[in-house]
Amino acid sequence: IDGSQLWFTNTELNAETIKACPDYIYLSQKSETYNIIKKELQDNLNTLFNKDVKVIKKLKPGSLCVGTTAQKNLTTYFSDSELKELGNDGFIIRTVKNNNTIIIANTEIGALYGTYHYIRLLQTSKDDLVNLNIVEVPSYDRRLLNHWDNLNGTVERGYAGHSLWQWDELPATISPRYEAYARANASIGINGSVLNNVNASPDILKTEYLNKVSVIAKVFRPYGIKVYLSVNFASPSVIGGLSDANPKSADVIQWWKDKAKEIYTIIPDFGGFLVKANSEGQPGPNDYGCTHADGANMLADALQPYGGIVMWRAFVYNPKGNDRAKQSYDEFMPLDGQFRSNVIIQVKNGPVDFQPREPISSLFGQMKHTTLMPELQITKEYLGFSDHLSFLGTLFKEFLDTDTYTEGRNTTVSKVTDGSVFNDSITAIAGVANIGLDTNWCGHHFAQANWYVFGKLAWNNQLSVRDVAKEWLMQTFSHDEDFVSSMSRVMMESREAVVNYMTPLGLHHLMGWGHHYGPEPWCVIEGARPDWLPTYYHKADSIGLGFNRSSTGTNAVAQYAEPLKSVYDDPKLCPEELLLWFHHLPWDYELNNGKDLWTELCYRYNLGVEQAQQFEETWNTLQNKVDMDRFKEVQQKLATQVREAIWWRDACVLYFQTFSDRPIPHELFKPVHKLEDLKKLKFNMTHHN
Ligand code: BDP
């Protein structure tokens, strides 16, 4: 077993659900999507129950019925209002009279989601499923993957091989992986893909490429997945022959209008644009003295006649600014309320950049008159690439569950972004994909779980990620209870372990310059942007450690609503896991547990190593519960993780020791490495791609 089947690998029936086997599948409609539904149900039911379940066109007792509200013989069992509330993508699965179970939705795609849900239940539920009444409506309307894939086939921050999209072969040749990808996404509710890197090549908007994109869109369509593209703001001048890309210029406005028209002629259900502007060297409206709102609105107006949207990224910062963590807020807050209704501002979860742990971006909840969408990173740029096992469900959930307090208690990030608090014109969430051409798609077998959990949380941001982990383990590996409970425990702890051995107590960005793999807290590079260097973030000195973002420092805390602001501002109240994010504290600063900062730091780094060792030991006890190939591959990765956890611990502790001038508590650990040796290590990127 090579992992290519993702969470469709282990098609085992859960013992309790054996009674649920329908006698028939009632499907009276025809379409490409219904063909998928039919195939999924037949294949799965036949395998699961080892029985030939017939598809019928006239309803009989004992049927599993799938359809939409257009079929009046199915709707009699539902009230108009409950059907209406399902919106485009929701569904109901209900057992009615004559032992019939109906999967109903307003659209075929909703019925497809219901189908996948039902199959998943057969495989993982503890219930016997003979009397179902399930209503599911997604938290976000648009649930998107962002691919940072370049047109030359490389993937920015991709650790699972080259890009899935075979631009050179398209449109003539269609890789079978496009459909496999669409199926995997549809099974967890993802309904949009931005195909290309946010550092976008203008070429993507050339007719030649649009024709290629249209072929991918066609494969995705019956699975309910829309295609979106990242666009380069300078496109009108680079590929359009105009003298500039000024959003106020009539020619530029017209160019985008014409381009939008062309796009929708080629791809009628095109989703919209994702834009990285005036960020890390990308062009944007600021180049012409215009604001982000001017730029976003100009594009939004071009897409508006066709129902397209603009996802405009708030990831902006400038080396001249005083604290990178504050800049996105400072730049965007004054623009609140100025964006068109088909613009959504895409905001990274934290104020800096996808660190193992960050507080939430202060924009969430604060930009009350603008629609915001979270951007999460599924690919683990800063958490050990695809080499370390680190389940991001806990990271995503911690972020979504964080209370912004902007509209009083319990106005969590989930609620301020999914339409529960504000009257959002669009609701959306994006995850930067970890998918590539590797046989197992994600580089590490367990990295597939991060794709999976992103999709599940985009569908329902209230889910328990422990349950998601278990459900994923059952479908991907085995139903064995010991296996599922042991590995779900590992998964649930794994992100915290990474935080511990990389950046405990609110430290951040200690990773090597550029590649972001491995520890380089000492890193200084002549001429490099200071805000890309670790020393900018940890600010270690003889007095202590941490970035003072309190009211005595850069006052980033002031960007949060009360009581967050006061809590973050006071080291005694600030959650310990964010302490050094907000404060520069003396080495002998006493923490709540009575230990001084230096001791606690050593303790946490070592704890991370112990956790990684524990993961490896746990996996080794499970050898006879998984297939040999995946067992060995994961085993090898876990061994690497332990080795590198030690590398991280030693590098950081030994380096910070040059400032603290204190001994490592002898009962904790003795470094394996010497600081001079670690400083000489050169990272080899090719090994990791
Ligand atoms: C950072 C990455 C960089 C991306 C950038 C972005 O290091 O490769 O282009 O974010 O999100 O995380 O635009």
Image (cartoon, rainbow, N blue to C red):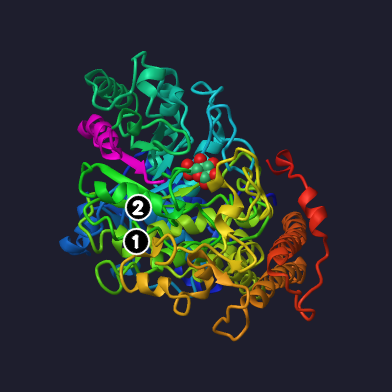
| CB contact under 8 Å: marks 1 and 2 | yes
- The answer to whether residue 24 of the structure is visible from this angle is no
Residue sitting at 33 percent across and 37 percent down? 271
SS type, badge 1:
helix
Q: Residue furthest front?
A: 542
Q: Residue furthest bottom?
A: 594
Position of 287 with respect to 605 (left or right) is left
SS type, badge 2:
helix
The amino acid marked with disc number 2 is Tyr
Position of 75 with respect to 661 (left or right) is left
Residue 274, image x, y percentages: 38, 38
Q: Is residue 525 above or below residue 62?
A: above
- The answer to whether residue 423 of the structure is visible from this angle is yes
Residue sitting at 52 percent across and 75 percent down? 576
Q: Residue furthest left?
A: 80
Which of the pair 165/285 is nearer the observer?
285
The residue that mark 1 highlights is 559
**Image quadrant containing the C terminus:** top right
Which of the pair 557/484 is nearer the observer?
557
Q: Which mark is residue 329?
A: 2
> Looking at the rendering, which quadrant does residue 485 occupy?
bottom right
Q: Is residue 301 magenta?
A: yes
Residue bounds of the magenta highlight: 290-315
Residue sitting at 48 percent across and 53 percent down? 352
Q: Is residue 233 above or below residue 62?
A: above
The amino acid marked with disc number 1 is Gln
Position of 250 with respect to 35 (left or right) is left
Residue 397, image x, y percentages: 45, 65
Residue 263, image x, y percentages: 33, 25
Q: Is residue 545 above or below residue 510?
A: below
Residue sitting at 52 percent across and 62 percent down? 547
